[in-house]
């Protein structure tokens, strides 16, 4: 599908989502909560967002070292901040993860092991989402969660666990040997497809080889859990900022699930998806809709504000670049 059509479909989806949302919420009610914002709570929430890229760099550093890629933590922090900024600033279709892999490849590092480490980190992040959300469900219990919400979270967690099991099994690469036999000697395009399939197998092998390093995986999982806890703290602080505190147990149950929905590649930055998830989960807990929407919308300037270090790194690189004679 052409890139312009994909962009058009995403914009149409975002427009549809907000049309439905604002048919149920009057903008005047939303503006009222923005006027009541407490800047101190917003600043505290922004600091939690700013800490997350550092955690990403620490996690990736641990995984890369197992593959013999020894980059300084400071270099990886810079790569993470820069890729976050460039994924928004550049008119390209690459996400932050793809840009990080390109930067590592440009630094003469193994693309296969970098990709395997990145996928391993994403899987452990998904497990952290599931574990923290289930802890929140057990903590809040029926007193704070209705049965529909609890069963929704349990169903999503089960589907996530199945997807991870499939990804770690031989299923994602079992089709490669038959494909190689079928396409062998059939021209340049067939050769490129075979090369791509071989790279997928290599990345899958790099990913599954982490099973020999359980202690390292446990550390990365703990860091992913900490990252998810920071996101829960961020949302709790933002609810304080709009003068409507929520129980931490509810946030622990809902926020990881909301974060998972925003990873779906059907929108830009989770626009529309995040708002719908906020309204569903926190709305089921009795939080007024304008409050849920206000908190969701405040997260975007915080995320963009946390990209400022990446912009400074890019500017520094441009200023240091030697001028052509």
Image (spheres, grey):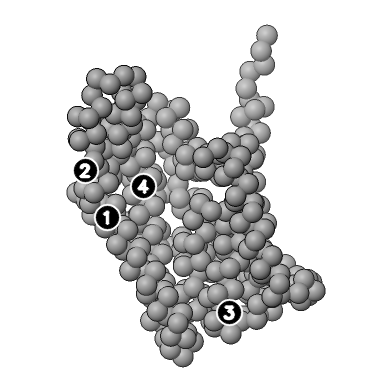
Residue depicted at 60% across the width and 51% down the height: 10
The picture places residue 175, in percent across and down from the top left corner, at 23, 41
Q: Nearer the viewer, mark 1 or mark 4?
A: 1
Q: Which residue is mark 3?
A: 283
Looking at the picture, does residue 264 appear above or below residue 45?
Answer: above
Asked if the residue at tag 3 contacts the one at tag 1, i.e. Cβ–Cβ closer than 8 Å, the answer is: no
Nearer the camera: disc 3 or disc 2:
2
Residue sitting at x 25%, y 27%: 183
What's the distance in space between the residues labelled 1 and 3, CA to CA? 33 Å
Query: Badge 2 is on which residue?
Result: 174
Q: Earlier in the sequence, mark 1 or mark 4?
A: 4
Among the two numbered marks 1 and 3 on one chain, the one whose residue lies closer to the N terminus: 1
Image coords of residue 202 (percent x, y): 27, 36
Residue in the picture at 47% in, 84% down: 145
Which label sits on residue 215? Answer: none
Give neighbour class at mark 3: few <14, some 14-19, many 20+ (Cα, 10 Å): some
Quick check: 24 left or right of 95? right
Task: Give the spatial CA distance, label 2 vs label 4.
Answer: 18 Å
In this rendering, the label closer to the viewer, 2 or 4: 2
Quarter residue 291 falls in: bottom right
Check disc 4 and report the residue beneath it: 119
For disc 1, the marked residue is: 166
């Amino acid at each position: 599908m052409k890139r312009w059509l994909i962009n058009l479909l995403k914009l149409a989806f975002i427009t549809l989502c907000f049309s439905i949302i604002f048919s149920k919420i009057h903008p005047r009610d939303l503006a009222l909560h923005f006027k009541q914002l407490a800047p101190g709570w917003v600043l505290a929430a922004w600091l939690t967002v700013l800490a997350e890229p550092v955690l990403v760099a620490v996690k990736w550093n641990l995984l890369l070292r197992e593959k013999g890629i020894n980059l300084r933590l400071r270099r990886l922090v810079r790569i993470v901040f820069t890729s976050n900024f460039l994924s928004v600033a550049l008119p390209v279709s690459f996400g932050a993860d793809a840009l990080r892999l390109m930067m590592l490849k440009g630094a003469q590092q193994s693309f296969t092991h970098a990709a395997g480490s990145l996928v391993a980190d994403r899987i452990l992040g998904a497990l952290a989402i599931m574990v923290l959300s289930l802890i929140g469900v057990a903590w809040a219990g029926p007193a704070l969660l209705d049965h529909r919400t609890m069963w929704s979270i349990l169903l999503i967690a089960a589907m996530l666990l199945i997807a991870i099991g499939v990804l770690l099994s031989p299923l994602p690469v079992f089709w490669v040997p038959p494909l190689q036999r079928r396409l062998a000697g059939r021209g340049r395009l067939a050769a490129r497809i075979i090369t791509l399939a071989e790279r997928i197998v290599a990345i899958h092998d790099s990913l599954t080889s982490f099973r020999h390093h359980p202690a390292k995986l446990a550390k990365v999982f703990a860091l992913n859990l900490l990252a998810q806890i920071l996101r829960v703290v961020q949302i709790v602080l933002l609810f304080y900022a709009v003068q409507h505190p929520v129980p931490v147990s509810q946030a622990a149950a809902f926020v990881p699930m909301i974060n998972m929905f925003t990873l779906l590649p059907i929108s830009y930055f989770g626009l529309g998806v995040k708002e719908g998830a906020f309204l569903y989960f926190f709305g089921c807990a009795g939080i007024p809709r304008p409050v849920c929407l206000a908190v969701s919308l405040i997260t975007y300037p915080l995320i963009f504000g946390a990209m400022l270090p990446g912009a400074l790194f890019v500017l520094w690189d441009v200023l240091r670049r030697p001028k052509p004679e």
